[in-house]
Amino acid sequence: MMQYSNSPNLVKYMMCIIKQQDELVKAIQDTINLRYLADAFGKQLDVIGEIVGQGRIIAGAAALGYFGFYDEPLSTNPSIGDDATPTIGGTYRSDGDRASTDFRMNDVQYRQAIYAKILKNDSRCSIDDVLTWIDLIVGYECDTEIIEGVNTGTIFIHESLSQTSRITLGLFMVFMKPVGTGLILRDNTGVITIRPIDRNAV
């Protein structure tokens, strides 16, 4: 082999073998690392979601915020947006958008929902758990106030949440509120409708 040590063809051949070995090592590392929720994406997230009982698609979810489609705060509040405040208003539905009202979370939303589901699975619905759960769904630490009453309560999130965050909170809050109590959920832009949805759909 020594006589071919400076052969360009042999060097290229060896580099091809090393490159394939590096790809194999990376694939093995990904198989291990992408099992962690913080690093997982795509199908790996779907598998983790199945383990904790949280689906990516919410079948039959209500208004998804298309401009002019729904006259209620959950979908468009207000319906017309503002250049200075991109968090308000509904988006236009293009020809390529599905007409279905199913809500499919992207990887970022789904990861937050899985974290929240893990908390919910082990929660007794204490105030601290509810506050943490809201932060997980929204994706950042919110300035949230909980006002307790007799068999009812108000959760006031002192933020101007995005339409997606409002919709997600409205869909999932029913799973985190104490049984037998009334609950009003709102942010700076108004009341967020808490929607009863099919528990088998999530």
Image (cartoon, rainbow, N blue to C red):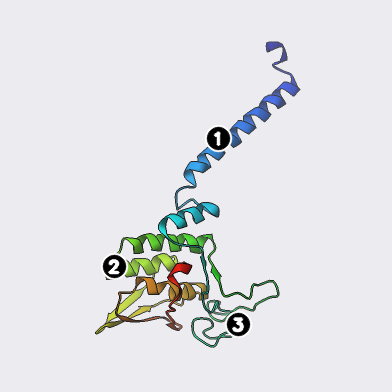
How far across and how far down the image is residue 94, in percent? 68, 75
How far across and how far down the image is residue 152, in percent? 29, 83
Q: Residue at x 33, y 70 (%)?
A: 130
Disc on the earlier residue, 1 or 3: 1
Q: Is residue 147 visible?
A: yes
Q: Are marks 2 and 3 in contact (CB under 8 Å)?
A: no
Where is mark 2, residue-wise? 128
Q: Is residue 141 visible?
A: no
Distance in Å between CA atoms under marks 1 and 2: 43 Å
Work out which residue is located at the far bottom of the displayed protein and give it: 71
Disc on the earlier residue, 2 or 3: 3
How far across and how far down the image is residue 74, in percent? 49, 81
Going by the image, does 8 lie left or right of 146? Answer: right
For disc 2, the neighbor class at 10 Å (few under 14, some 14 to 19, many from 20) is few
Q: Are marks 1 and 2 in contact (CB under 8 Å)?
A: no
Where is mark 1, residue-wise? 25
User: In terms of secondary structure, where does tag 1 sit?
Assistant: helix
Please state, as top left, top right, bottom left or bottom right, where the N terminus lies in the image: top right
How far across and how far down the image is residue 54, in percent? 45, 62
Q: Amino acid at mark 2?
A: Asp
Q: Amino acid at mark 3?
A: Phe
Q: Residue at x 57, y 75 (%)?
A: 101
Q: Are marks 1 and 3 in contact (CB under 8 Å)?
A: no
Q: Residue at x 70, y 23 (%)?
A: 11
Where is mark 3, residue-wise? 67
Decide: is 18 above or below 62: above
Work out which residue is located at the far left of the displayed protein and give it: 150
